[in-house]
Amino acid sequence: MTRLLMDEGEFRKALAAEDYAAAHALILAWPAEAATQSKEAYLLLLRTARRQRQMAVLAEYLAKAPRRLLGLPRLQLEAGYAARARGDDAAALKHFAAAGTPGRLQGAVTLAGLGQAAEARSLLQAFLADQPAEPSAWRLLGDLEQAEGRWSEAAQAYAAARNLAPGRIAAWQPLVELLLARDDQPALLQALAAITPVLDGLADPQPFHRLGLRLALAAGDLAAAQAHLDAQPAPEPGDVLPLLQAQRLAGALEAAQAILDRLLASHPQVASLQQEAVLLALAHIDRLAATDRVAAMAAATALAERWPERPEARGKRLELGLTGRNFGALIAQIEALPEAAERVAWGVKLLQRLRRSNRLETAEAMAQRLLQAEGEAVPLLEAAGVVARQRGNHALAYARFAAAHRQGADAAAREMAREALQLDRHAEAAALLQPVVAAHPQDRSAWLWLAEAQQRLDPEAALRTYAAGCAQAPDYERLWRGRAELAARFAGMEAGLAILALAEAQLPRQASLLRLRIRFLLKLGLEAEAAALLAEVEADFAADGGLRDLAIELHLDRCDFAAALPRIETLPVETPAERARQARFRGRYHALRWEIEPAEAAFRAALAAHPLEEHAAFPLTRLCILTQRAEEGFAVQQEHSRRKRARGASSNPNQGLAGALVNELRIDPAPLAVARAAREAGDHATLARLVRDNPHNTGTAIALLAGWRFDRGLPAGVELPAAAGGRPIPASVIQYWDEDAPPEDLQRLMASWPQLLPGWAYRCFSHRQALAWLQQHATPEVMLAYRRAREPARKSDILRLAVLLRDGGVYADADDRCLKDLTPLLAGRSLVLWQEQFGTAGNNFIAVIPGHPVIAEALAQATLATLEGYSGTLWLETGPGAMSRALASHLAAQADPLGPLDRGEILLLDTVAMRRHVAFHLQAAYKSAGRHWVRDRHAW
């Protein structure tokens, strides 16, 4: 017995020394009567080899095991371990199956590793039925449940494992990790509460306090987290940092500072703690800035000096500087930053701050300084380009984006194109944008700009681009709107309405599309339909300024002054642009009513509020023409043009009808000055003499015609009663289109005349038909003038006068729509014309008896101007200018110059009255196809 004990001691020493051969020899040396001890010793040898990961030794001694041990479950268990270690899972499972209850656990482990979860779960349940107190089995069951997403079952299994060994930190880990991953707040709070009873009696509670800190933070219980931290004599910075960050974010800055000070005392060199110190100081500064910006700036300066190497410390001082106004000091601080990238980044922020606060001149000065210092860094170039864009200097903006592009900023090509559009460099813009949309088909703005660039170059290509853009971005309303507008311009309003219908099918109801539909209806002369639609949708989009403005325009177009004025007076006037808009509407309101002084005051107020208010500059010029103040009109146009050029936009004040008229009136200022004085004095005799003495002076003709309306104080829209008797105006309508078949959109407008005037004669002359008629009925001079006329508009001017002189009747331009029966209007009249807002007599609508002297004189002037080869404006030579001079000459030859107008024999319809009968100057596709000879709208 003594020898056996000694041998057992030697055996254990051999195992401890991993001398398995010696241990095996000792077992073999034991006598037969020690069979039980030798069996246990042999199993211990196998188990020890396994636990020491000596799988080769394990396999060796399994092979040498005595035959009497081969059937033992524990030897089968070790054989299963060995088989699993060498990758023979099938043999392992066989051995584990023969090992009884312990083998079920290891069989489950093996099956789980093979992904056979159902079989593994079955073995585990069988094992736990016999051995419910085995924590590892519950952990494995939890792993299986978690892998299949059965979170509640996994939590229950992990909780069972923890409850079997609550004092072991490892027993808590699987459950805690699951709860943290699931962010299960109630379960986290329960786990946190369960830790407290475990702490009593533990020799080393620190691991549990660390776990409690994690749970408390995850559950959002900062007080519990603080308690677990305080219970740790030497907390690790990595454990505490999440609490510091949570307290900082929660605004518990004092508590966070106390913890940080404690940690820094024991870990002064830990970088993460130093970083947190800076972040906490920044939070203190942010809090201070809310009440005392000066103190906050002082603290930020101190922080930057304390941590000069930390960008966030330097950045806080700069950030506070951006909220102030001392931009000179701020840019000096930016320039003093050590890193170029940092200087550039803060320079960009400075420019953005200045731009957003509308300090554009300061922003430009800072941009120049920064660009000079930083060698034109790309981000600065791009930010400076935006500054130049906002200032309206598109040439400078283009140059800056181009410089960024040369340095490799591909995205700058997009911005270059945007500026090229503003500079009317459409071909360049299109060339820049083609590769952009090819590389980035989702860039909907690029599609829009490309289509806009192509409009002037190739409208059909632009329409294709719009269609492609709409296909790529079907929810982008601006693409649909641009497509509809372009289709309307080049294919007619109906084509635009068809595109709008497609857009409305793709998009939710939008005010912008409704506005466009209403405008299209108005351009078709369908004011009633437009008004009905506006009334239907206005309440649904009460906050939409565009619909509000459109309602005012429509009321003014329909001359519903009682409805327009209250809307004008309640417009917002917070910004200069809003004040300019209200003043412009007010000016148009008064101008339509021939209230010249308040109209002029309103237009000047619009220009004062917003110097680039184009819709006020041109009406103001027209008022100056109307009142014989050509030099003032010239000054208005020159100043407006100067301001546009200063913003980088192109402008030629001599382009357009208003510019041409101003220049015409300035040629001979002397009679114009006399005419103005006579008109203001109501001296019609002097005006008539001036017209007789200057029959080719358009300014004196305007003075006489406008003077009649001013002197009589006629209300807007009045139609003076007709004189009794006299020859009637023939019930016939003529129109002209130089080609045999007018475009479809014009055909629809022209059809309104025979439709609303049934029983009237109607004829539309083509160029070929006009030649035939003139050959038969006109003088050789008129025929020659028609042949020499190069422009279709000039040919039309000559033809209408020739036909009306011989036959009388009604002439209407092809883009005018008849709105009602004209018979009552024409009864008792010898001549009916529209008096334009220049005070002139228009020639787009003429109703006259045959042989009228006004028509004869207008035809004579038009014929002479054409035969003499004048190269002036058609409007002046053969159009309303000639008609106005002819009418003024006819009136001036009368004993009572204003008598024919006062008696209603000659009727001059103002715009208000004209719109009751005829919708004029409507949109038509030909005007956008290079065939429209005048761009100015003659009405207000």
Image: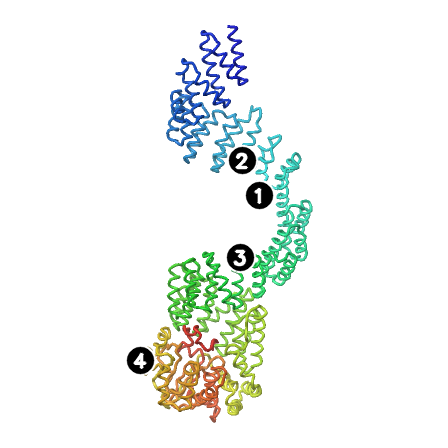
- In the picture as drawn, the residue positioned furthest to the top comes out as 1
Check disc 2 and report its element: helix, strand or loop.
helix
Query: Within 10 Å of the Cα at label 4, are there few (<14), some (14-19), or many (20+) other Cα atoms?
Result: few
- Say which residue label 4 marks: 758
- Say which residue label 3 marks: 410
Frontmost of labels 3 and 2 is 3
Q: CA distance from mark 1 to mark 2?
A: 16 Å
Query: Within 10 Å of the Cα at label 3, are there few (<14), some (14-19), or many (20+) other Cα atoms?
Result: few
Q: Looking at the picture, how far across and down is residue 364, in whole percent?
A: 62, 62
Q: How is the image coloured?
A: rainbow
Q: CA distance from mark 4 to mark 3?
A: 65 Å
Three-letter amino acid code of the residue under disc 2: Ala
Check disc 4 and report its element: helix, strand or loop.
loop
- Say which residue label 1 marks: 249
Q: On screen, 189 above or below 624?
A: above
Q: Looking at the picture, how far across and down is residue 285, in whole percent?
A: 64, 47
